[in-house]
Amino acid sequence: MREAFAFARLRGRGRCSAFAVALATVCVLAGCGGSSGGDATASTGGGTVNVGVASTLSGTFAALGVPGLNGIKLAINQINHSGGLLGHKLHLVTADDQIDPSTGATVTRNLILNHHVQVLFGSVSSAVALAQAQLAERYNVPLFLHMANDIGLTTTHFSKQIYEISTNTDMEPAAAALAFVKFFGKGPVRIATITPDYSFGLDTVSAFLHDLKKDGVTYTVTTQQTPQLGATSYTSNISAVLSSNPQFVFVGEYGGDLVTLTKQGIGLGLFSKAKVGGMYGWDVVKAVGRQMPAGVMAWNRGAFWAEPSTAMSAFVTAYKSAYGAYPDEWSINGYDAAEIWAEGVKKAGSFDASKIADALGGASVPTPRGSITIRACDHQAEVTEDTGIVASSVNPTYGVPLWSKTYAPPVKQIIEPCSVP
Amino acid sequence: MTLGTAARRGAIPAAVLVVLLVLPALLGATSLLDIQSAIALALFACATNLLVGYGGLVSFGQAAFYGTGAYTVALMWMHWQTSFWLGFAAAPFVGAIAALLVGLVALRTRRLYFALLTLAFSQLFYVIALQQEKFTGGANGVFGEILPGFLNGMNNAYYFTLGVVVVALLALWWITRSPFGMTLRAIRENRERAEALGVNVFGHQLLAFVFAGVFCALAGTLAVVHDSSANPNILNWTESGYPVFMAVIGGQYLFLGPVVGAFIYEQGRDIVLANSNDYQLVFGLLLLAVVLFAPDGVLGMVVRAGQWLGRRRGGSPLSPRDGDDVASDDRAGSETTVALR
Amino acid sequence: MTLSSDIVTMLAAMTEASYLFIAAAGLTLVFGAMRIINIAHGSFYMYGALILTSVVGGVAGGRFWLGLLAAPLALVGIGAGVEIGVLRRIYKRDHLVQLVATYALFLIFADIALHVWGSQPRSVNPPSPLDGSVVIGSGKFPSYDLFAIGAAVVVGAALWALLQRTALGWRIRAAAEDPEILAVSGTNVPLLSTSVFMIGAALAGFAGALAAPLESVAPGLDATIVVSAFIVAVIGGLGSVVGAALAAIIISLFDTVGVIWVPQWSSAFIYIAMIAVLALRPWGLLGVAER
């Protein structure tokens, strides 16, 4: 109606090009005002509470974002199945951040202001998560991060609305360094590195080398390769690594990039000439398949086969029947994040963000990965990595080689003291 | 043109401006931020259109200068703790220098080679921002209290953005109507003829490229006002595509076409993102529809509809063309030319 | 570094060059004959790879060859649809419009792929006779990569024969040189355009299928490959198939040598190479200046 009004008023005036500008602009502005008003009424009534997920659901990183979303969805469905939360049914609202901080901010703001979500689950990317954190802080909505794990999110950019459910970019390489000592000893060793030219990769590799030194490993670095994120060919990097003649190759790639690098590395003999370590979670091992080389050192944020417990096997069964696939580390972290939030709501007896923060700080929550404590000072979950050595034979149940040795570095040894400014 | 037509021509943009001025009183926070973002993008699109529409130079690399503007503000703040205002003042100059250097190389090439070479420059800036993490903050970019207290107020930020864009658009408009702008158009229409007449084609195109760089950098500083951050995504080639698409959607042969395109793009994007996860599909179909059925953009189509209505009613003929419209070049189809002349 | 590891390094560079060449050849062929820069070429490449993974399924081996055939054939159909449905309407319009139209198609194809094939990375193994490695001195090199290099040589030779030895090739070259004369000479230009576009799409699909065992096939592959293919085509000179071959080899070698000497700048190489070449030769290595 506002459009029609604007049109009628303006049509009477003149017939020059400027007329058109005004018409188009006013229509667009009016259209926007109309739509946001409509959303607000639709989402609040009926005793349901909206749960927002703003994550990466298209492009390369959808391979991480979608399983993460599936984990959250499973938890929400289970909660609704058993009667909801504080008597409310939960309704999931999802949005694609396109792995762009600006888009991420737009869709997150929309979830908060137009869909009135009571909780947010965040992005794959730390850059997007930093933008989301600013909004969570401003609008007082809890933000659970089950994938983005930049250390800045719980230190320099800390807000009490942010909960980091994954190991952060300090803890993950610290765990990998401990696993290195456990499986390969303290050297001396020649190390080459391949990491994406992305904050995550660059931070991870420098922290890993720093931690190795701290753990008493003697090493020299032969070459440090930083291929582009999402590259289709790593052969030149692999050749450069091989010609530097290392004994251990630290790989900071993940997801599809790690699959590509592994396949090209197998052909070029990377895995037979050196020990390799990387984030070989279920998603990657599954994609590489039976070719997966034995003896690789793997670490990731949740390996269901490495943590056999009744809670974990119940989760795996439920996930398998819901999605026809086994859960990877992203789904496990997503599921845990949703469970932890729900527990916080129950403890607080309210959806209020400040009450949840008080209830969850220092609390321990049972999850498939075991009991997880949320550190009171910075809301970093006290979690560790699953690490292991890839077995030489294919596991008959899963059709790919799993791990022959497993090791979960103690949380106390990888978590740094709280450094909230 | 007479004073009367000038007044009439100015009337509608002025009316729109009044609407934009009172908007903060009418709209909620999200909508206002979206409009603010569209206003900033309108400058980005118009600055790019100085090359694309007026110069016939399809640059797919303007994000390089947009990002340069944003990073100038953010990096000066991060490394030297300078105030936002100093960065804001410096950004257009840094944008000019960057554009001068890129233009000197890129303008040696023509047409699609130029488009793809500017794209390569944009990508080069992008990978540098990603890889030189110590200096640029890497993929996470620069976050923090970049903005002064004044700009943290939502209405202040909105009015600041609007003010900067209005002044910048007036300056751009003046440039397009100056003898320089006319020559630029003459080069686009017929480069060989302009050369034969003794026009320094390279010099004019380089100056246009520098002007575009200045205003793109200015738009980049407004992105910092909106996001209070700078990150490498704003340097990516896909980001370079947006202002070009905005110009095409709105109409690249009208000065205000890209402004309309920016609003349609930004508002449409928010609506689609809010209601569906098929953003790419919807945006792709929209672009395709505009390209196939509205060859001179949405604004061009509206103008044409206005002309048609005027003729049907037997009203007075259109005010004579006086350079406000950009004539389409010979490749753009004769129908466009007829409609806009 | 030993001699055998040098050979392996160079061969690895040639593998990368092989599918870059095939993808860029399609792009450059279409540009030469039709003066269209097709951004959706990246989508065609990704579709080729995705179709191959679908045909192969979980089965390793025999069905691979079927997939390698099915992928370009399917792309011939998709290419024909795009040319007749969209491009034919905008030949008379300027380059910008064509770029925007093909970018729109790129977006649409990306979203359709997400719905059809999902977001998880897909992966196929090389068929059994090519699954292993050949030993070169103290190094080893994957047999499949040798096959890919061979396939690129065969495709290059076939394209050369097509362009130089057939009536269709003569018309394509004539279209590249002077479209007006071709129209006057009685050639059915729309049919020619459709044929060329189908060949270009098939080349993209074949390149994607050929590269599938070497990489993980996932959303986003389209954007990565189209930028690389553009750069190769532009450095070689738009319209020149030989130039594309030359540029693919140069880029791959540059990349391979570069990462050993200055690894921290590796992802910038390709752009620096393009800027350097175009600064010295504005029409690419073997391109012809446009009138």
Image (cartoon, coloured by chain):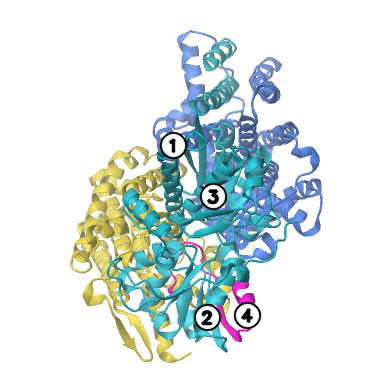
Regarding residue B193, the answer to whether it shows in the image is no
The reply to the same-chain question for discs 3 and 4 is yes
* Residue hosting label 4: A215
* Label 3 crowd bin: few (<14), some (14–19), many (20+), radius 10 Å: many
**Mark 3 to mark 4: distance in Å?**
32 Å
Residue drawn at (37%, 52%) of the image: A319
* Residue hosting label 1: A83
Q: Furthest-top residue in view?
A: B314
* Label 1 crowd bin: few (<14), some (14–19), many (20+), radius 10 Å: few
**Mark 4 to mark 1: distance in Å?**
49 Å
x and y percentages locating residue A130 in the rendered image: 63, 51
Q: Which of disc 2 and disc 3 is earlier in sequence?
A: 2
Q: Amino acid at mark 3?
A: Ile
- Nearer to us of marks 4 and 1 is 1
Residue stretch in magenta:
A206-235
**Is disc 4 placed on a helix, strand or loop?**
loop
Residue in front for this viewpoint, B263 or A365: A365
